């Protein structure tokens, strides 16, 4: 004991000496801080049970040809004082996800609370006062709040222990559940009145649990202690996001008078959907995960049928996975992780007759071949379709004028179109007039790249922009049309020189969109592109009364 006391005394003397610490001696150690400070887990996209339902609503708005509606939102306060989340920003995200293809809603971002105003808001105020900016009045606004948070609605505690002369044990288990409620309403901005019947009042349970084991004993004159425990705590942030997305689907579905319930009955809304997929993911090994994802990417057209097995660093694999992740709205990393596994195989999971999630067409441990209805080909929407059908690659083209069923327009009348692709693609669009002139619309000096992400609506022209760069007016009487072509890569250098000229200039030697398609087919091959065309009839302008 005397030796230990002497050692401790010597240590105290050394630490309390007059010489200060020299940070330069720790430079080699501190140099590791840069790497240690970075996250060790890759970030993932925030996905809730209703993320697929939001995309379903987007397609539903698109199919119903709903015009763009301006909408805004009040701050959504937390009256419980226990849920400090940005609920208003979640509303904006939900609206954005419901408008990617349909452009159904555009959010008017204006803040009147001085405490929340930023540089953009201050500049907006200055420009408004100088009549240099126009603020459009929204038609609708979202109102609501986190209405309550009842904690420990159910609580179960178990504590057991034993005691002996040389051994003591203890075991504890705790479970509790809280209920979170949110109220959302839709109001008419012009009258500042809440629209009757357009409300959403939903609740969700947040659970917490813990288990612990303690052991202590004595061996002679020495004591030994051992303690181990595990806990889980479901966060309030994902719970609020789930309530916000569910509420927005209900409110806007009721307001638009569309069968929104069809988007709430998807298998992905099952509470155990991702948890069950995670269990299956952990059942198999990395090689089986990669083979299942390979089969899925082949069925979706991201890999050729003869694609080799996964190998680390294979550029073909990294590019295919990266494109799939980008098209699926994920954080792109080119790695077969759980999120990629879940997105690739979610088409092969369904709710069985017993109400539980079941596999369809694949096996976790053997990577059985995927042969399901997901291999069906959808080539897109349009009066005419060009190119050969490809799995999961389609191009849609619509006329966006107020009456979508119109097939004729008067000379000089302005036209609006939009197009979307199911996969990130290089897009080129051409217009043919009744006078036999063909011009390219996209790419142009406004959109030079020509790249478009999956499920992104490209407007022709961009009627939401104050400076769209061009307009489309109906020409002389006759048949007119627009055709768009999508390729996975920028294939411009493989096209004839006459198709590589500037936009909005008549292409010599071409008289119709079919001429463009023939050049595409001869240069790229029928399997190298996907195209769609829309046509309408131009009639003489009627005399104004």
Image (tube, grey):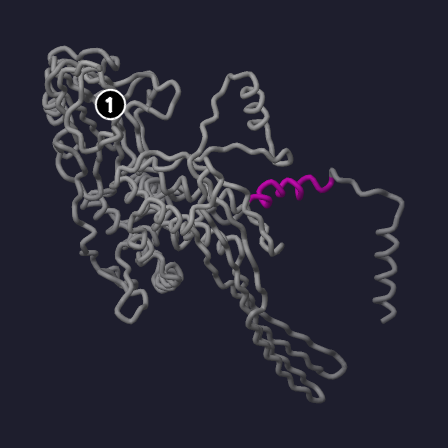
Q: Quadrant of residue 156?
A: bottom right
> 543 or 227, which is in the foreground?
543
Q: Quadrant of residue 21?
A: top right
Estimate the x, y position of residue 109 in percent, counting from the top left: 50, 33
The C terminus - image quarter: top left
Mark 1: few/some/many CA within 10 Å (<14, 14-19, 20+): some
Is 29 part of what is drawn in magenta?
yes
Estimate the x, y position of residue 303 in percent, counting from the top left: 24, 43
126 w.r.t. 214: above or below: above
- State how many labels appear: 1
- Type of secondary structure dominating the magenta stretch: helix
Q: Which residues lie in the magenta part?
A: 25-38
Left or right of 71, for residue 322: left
Is 183 part of what is drawn in magenta?
no
> 62 or 289, which is in the foreground?
62
Q: Quadrant of residue 520?
A: top left
> 428 or 17, which is in the foreground?
428
Q: Which residue is at 12% across, 36% downward? A: 388
Q: Which residue is mark 1?
A: 415
Left or right of 316, for residue 380: left
Estimate the x, y position of residue 435 in percent, counting from the top left: 12, 13
374 w.r.t. 153: above or below: above
The N terminus - image quarter: bottom right
User: Tag 1's secondary structure?
Assistant: strand
Q: Which residue is at 24% across, 61% downward? A: 360
């Amino acid at each position: 004991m005397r030796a230990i006391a002497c050692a401790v005394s010597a240590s105290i003397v050394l630490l309390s000496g007059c010489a200060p610490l020299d940070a330069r001696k720790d430079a080699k150690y501190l140099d590791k801080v840069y790497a240690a400070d970075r996250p060790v887990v890759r970030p993932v996209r925030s996905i809730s049970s209703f993320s697929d339902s939001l995309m379903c609503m987007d397609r539903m708005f698109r199919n119903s040809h709903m015009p763009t509606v301006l909408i805004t939102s009040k701050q959504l306060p937390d009256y419980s004082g226990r849920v400090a989340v940005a609920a208003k920003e979640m509303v904006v995200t939900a609206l954005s996800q419901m408008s990617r293809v349909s452009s159904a809603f555009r959010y008017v971002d204006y803040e009147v609370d001085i405490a929340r105003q930023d540089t953009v808001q201050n500049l907006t105020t200055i420009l408004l006062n100088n009549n240099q900016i126009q603020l459009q009045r929204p038609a609708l606004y979202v109102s609501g709040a986190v209405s309550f948070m009842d904690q420990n609605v159910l609580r179960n505690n178990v504590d057991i222990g034993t005691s002996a002369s040389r051994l003591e044990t203890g075991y504890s288990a705790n479970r509790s559940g809280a209920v979170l409620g949110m109220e959302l309403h839709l109001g008419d901005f012009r009258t500042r009145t809440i629209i009757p019947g357009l409300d959403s009042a939903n609740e969700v349970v947040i659970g917490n649990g813990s288990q612990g084991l303690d052991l202590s004993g004595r061996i002679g004159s020495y004591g030994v202690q051992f303690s181990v425990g595990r806990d889980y705590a479901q966060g309030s942030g994902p719970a609020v996001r789930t309530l916000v997305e569910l509420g927005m689907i209900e409110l806007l579905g009721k307001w638009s008078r569309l069968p929104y319930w069809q988007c709430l009955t998807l298998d992905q809304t099952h509470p155990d959907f991702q948890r069950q997929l995670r269990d299956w993911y952990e059942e198999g090994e990395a090689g089986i995960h990669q083979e299942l994802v390979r089969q899925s990417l082949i069925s979706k057209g991201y890999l050729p049928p003869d694609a080799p097995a996964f190998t680390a660093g294979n550029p073909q694999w990294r590019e295919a996975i990266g494109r799939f992740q980008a098209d699926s709205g994920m954080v792109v990393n080119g790695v077969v992780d759980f999120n990629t596994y879940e997105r690739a195989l979610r088409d092969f999971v369904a709710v069985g007759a017993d109400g539980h999630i079941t596999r369809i067409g694949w096996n976790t441990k053997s990577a059985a071949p995927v042969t399901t209805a997901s291999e069906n080909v959808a080539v897109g929407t349009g009066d005419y379709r060009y190119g050969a059908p490809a799995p999961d690659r389609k191009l849609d083209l619509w006329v966006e004028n107020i009456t979508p069923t119109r097939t004729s327009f008067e000379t000089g009348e302005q036209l609006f179109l939009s197009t979307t692709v199911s996969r990130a693609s290089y897009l080129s669009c051409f217009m043919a007039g009744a006078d036999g002139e063909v011009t390219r619309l996209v790419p142009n000096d406004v959109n030079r790249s020509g790249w478009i992400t999956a499920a992104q609506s490209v407007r022709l022209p961009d009627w939401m922009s104050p400076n769209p760069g061009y307009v489309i007016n109906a020409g002389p009487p006759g048949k007119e049309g627009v055709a768009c072509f999508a390729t996975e890569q920028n294939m411009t250098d493989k096209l004839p020189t006459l198709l590589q000229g500037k936009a909005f200039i008549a292409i010599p030697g071409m008289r119709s969109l079919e001429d463009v398609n023939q050049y595409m087919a001869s240069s790229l091959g029928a399997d190298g592109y996907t195209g769609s065309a829309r046509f309408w009839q131009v009639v003489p302008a009627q005399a104004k009364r």
